[in-house]
Amino acid sequence: MPNVLVTGGAGFIGSHFACAIEQNKHMKVVIYDAMTYSSDLSRLKNYNGTIVNGDIGDYDKVLTTLKEHEITHIVNFAAESHVDRSIEDVNPFLRTNVFGTVSLMEAAEKYWLETNGGYKDKLFVHISTDEVYGELREKDRPLDEKAPLKPSNPYAASKAAADQFVIAKISGEGFPGMIVRSSNNFGLNQNDEKLIPKVIRCLNENMDIPLYGNGQQRRCWLYVEDYCRILMELMEAGPIGEIFNVKGASSLSNLEVVCKMREAYASLVNLPVDAVSHIAFVQDRKTHDYFYNIDQSKLLRMGISPAHKRIEDFIDEKQFFIK
Ligand SMILES: NC(=O)c1ccc[n+]([C@@H]2O[C@H](COP(=O)([O-])OP(=O)(O)OC[C@H]3O[C@@H](n4cnc5c(N)ncnc54)[C@H](O)[C@@H]3O)[C@@H](O)[C@H]2O)c1
């Protein structure tokens, strides 16, 4: 039975994943998280495993943790994840997303090769993003895993750089890695600075909802619970050395998301839509990709079913507001 280290497990996606894998697969799970501003332990109310407060770039601490818990599988969610912050200051992105990932792999290599019987039955899943492929238009063909990486913001560049180090370690040294590149996630417990929680806060506090540019940027929204199920299936299928795209069930522009959320909120509080927070278009950020579109046929060929839940249905269920 694998012992799984979930880095970034106090973050949005990592916390859903740690709970899902513990409850559904009954594996031993250890969360390893530096507890930055984007972590929140209240996301882990239903989690019973160990939590280690540590930085993935702290080689010695990672190594000690791997040894102590006899870790066989690592799923690396730990990252600086907010594009706006990367435009302000790229340094934390370089430290965690690039150096941190490399250091984490080196610690895993040392432990697995020197004291845990080699790479057999070991797996390092690196969580990446569709943003590494860069911006597309709706008429463009979806990109598969072989497409060149063309990041267009510092966050995406740091993720693309990390991907290249993982690829180099797999192909050069036979490291048991796998890379998963997903589209934008949605679900409960997302960070306050992301679009959906921001809209919820504005609606609850009856404040204008700031929306970048004309709001036409479009994302393929992936339900976080669908994503966790797909990741667990990929871990079990274990095709080492491969890259997989994972895409959401529907695509909506930011403006469409906000409009649907206003409608859902208005119906919840029994008011006409015009009586709830209005949209205030604000100056767009320096770099704002219009659209990402990935081809996930490789995932489907593995017999893994795609994400099902559409963001519009989730908004209609109003869980965001009631939780
Ligand atoms: N959220 C999305 O829509 C989305 C989409 C595609 C890919 N991803 C990728 O998924 C992963 C998780 O994203 P998220 O939205 O859950 O991010 P998040 O910001 O909510 O969580 C990141 C977690 O990593 C931790 N962390 C940061 N630096 C660390 C370090 N040096 N050492 C250990 N822990 C550290 C933070 O404390 C936090 O708990 C990231 O790698 C991100 O690039 C996210």
Image (cartoon, helix red, strand yellow):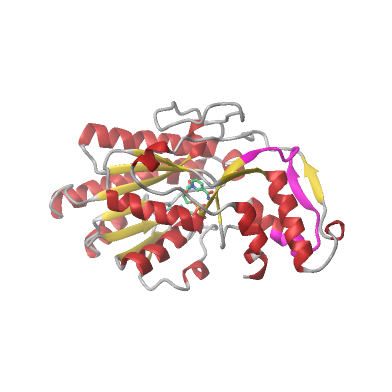
Relative horizontal placement of residue 214, taking residue 36 as reference (left or right): right
Name the residue located 31 percent from the left edge and 51 percent from the top edge.
235
Write down the quadrant of residue 139 in the picture: top right
Write down the quadrant of residue 53 in the picture: bottom left
Q: Is residue 224 above or below residue 138?
A: below
Q: Where is residue 207 drawn, in percent x and y?
A: 80, 58
- The boundaries of the magenta stretch are 200-218
Check residue 211 for magenta coloring.
yes
Name the residue located 38 percent from the left edge and 59 percent from the top edge.
54
How many numbered marks, from 0 up? 0
Check residue 63 for magenta coloring.
no
Q: Is residue 209 above or below residue 42?
A: above
Q: Where is residue 261 drawn, in percent x and y?
A: 71, 56
State the residue in front, 263 or 93: 263
Q: Where is residue 291 drawn, in percent x and y?
A: 60, 35
State the residue in front, 115 or 17: 17
Is residue 59 visible in this depiction of the protein? no
Query: In what quadrant of the picture does the C terminus appear?
Result: bottom right
Query: In what quadrant of the picture does the N terminus appear?
Result: bottom left
Write down the quadrant of residue 251 in the picture: top right
Relative horizontal placement of residue 116, taking residue 238 as reference (left or right): left
Relative horizontal placement of residue 14, taking residue 104 as reference (left or right): right
Name the residue located 41 percent from the left edge and 66 percent from the top edge.
19
Name the residue located 44 percent from the left edge and 57 percent from the top edge.
14
Is residue 184 visible in this depiction of the protein? yes
Q: Where is residue 296 drawn, in percent x and y?
A: 44, 38
